[in-house]
Image (cartoon, grey):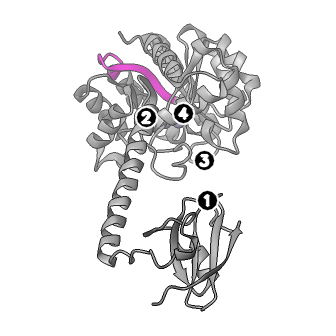
Amino acid sequence: MSAPSFFDIREIKKSNKNDTSNFYVGFFFDGTGTAITRPTKSVTHVSNNIEDLLLRPSTSWDCDYSSHRKHLWTTQKSPQPVETRSKKKAALNFLVLFIALFELHYKIKKRMVKMLFDTHVHLNARQFAEDREETIQRARDAGVKYMVVVGFDHETIPLAIEIAEQNENIYAAVGWHPVDAIDMTDKELEWIEELSAHPKVVAIGEMGLDYHWDKSPKDVQKKVFRQQIALAKKVNMPIIIHNREATEDIITILQEEKAEEIGGIMHCYNDSARYVQTCLDMNFYISLGGPVTFKNAPLPKEVAKQVPLDRLLIETDAPFLAPHPYRGKRNEPAYVARVAEDIAALRDMDVDEIGKITTENAKRFFKIK
Ligand SMILES: [Zn+2]
Ligand SMILES: [Zn+2]
């Protein structure tokens, strides 16, 4: 191509979104092309179509635009072969990927909380039958040093004990779930009493009232609840309370049965903060789980801010109630870190501090050395 003569150079502010620099656009008399350069004085492309030019990434040709304005195009080097360009692009992509991975790694590392205690997890649920060991390992990797596996029926109680026996720093709680209260006889009560002597059993529960499901009538639930509180007092162990839509009845029964003598945990506390003080007065701890991370759940957030730090516990209740952003998926003990993070944010504290305090509280509560 013969050297085109240069007649006009204009600054065009239009650019791609991320580029605040101006483009310098040259037009030619002979109509062989239109060139575009950046202030760095490197031409980016030659074309007849200015719109096309503005869309192209800058590459390729060096030229001294300031001193050789008129010879801008005659001194161009030819564009690099496509092969070289794609190699360069691949190298660039690799670099970008490497940086992204490094950043991700750093974020994960930064996120790992030093020490956590998941005070309520159902590793004995059939949802973990396939990958229980991997689940425990993921929890360990996330900083979860201690866990209490809660058993609540014929199937889950023996498994809770088995898991506790096989794993260091994993303990068990045994009780009868209120939903199945109708199935509990004296035989089950005696069985729970026997198991309470096991060295890895640290609490009686979960027990309580669940008015959401109607498998067991309320009066049966209340009777079974009272029987288990009496049992816990007899063996001198704290209790774990399951409460669904039954806060006032639960408080009444706990007060009437003098549960303050043994103390307990309001597991996955999800009611108004106005009941918190009553629970504290009965020697109870408040345990918060996944719902504290839900955007549309103001109650547990309010509770998270108000509970005295020395009575606060955290849990997952996995495989249920996965925290944000895992909501609706299978929950697992590693995610207790998410609960700690959101409580830390709500209280304007460091997540490691929340992890440490709640771990100390749980160890004190369950009498774990
Ligand atoms: Zn429960
Ligand atoms: Zn549970």
Q: On residue 213, which mark appears?
A: 3
Quarter of the image where the C terminus is located? top left
Q: Amino acid under label 3?
A: Trp
Of circles 3 and 4, which is in front? 4
Q: Earlier in the sequence, mark 3 or mark 2?
A: 2
Q: Would you call the spot at circle 2 few (<14 residues within 10 Å), some (14-19), or many (20 or more)? A: many
Q: Earlier in the sequence, mark 3 or mark 4?
A: 3
Q: Amino acid under label 1?
A: Asn
Q: Nearer the viewer, residue 319 or 203?
A: 319
Q: Earlier in the sequence, mark 1 or mark 4?
A: 1
Taking the image as shown, residue 108 lies to the left or right of residue 141, namely: right
Q: Nearer the viewer, residue 101 or 207?
A: 101
Of circles 3 and 1, which is in front? 1
Of circles 1 and 4, which is in front? 1
Q: On residue 331, which mark appears?
A: none
Distance from Cα at disc 2 to Cα at disc 1: 47 Å
- Which residue position holds label 1? 18
Q: Amino acid under label 4?
A: Val
Residue 175 locus on image (x, y percent): 44, 29
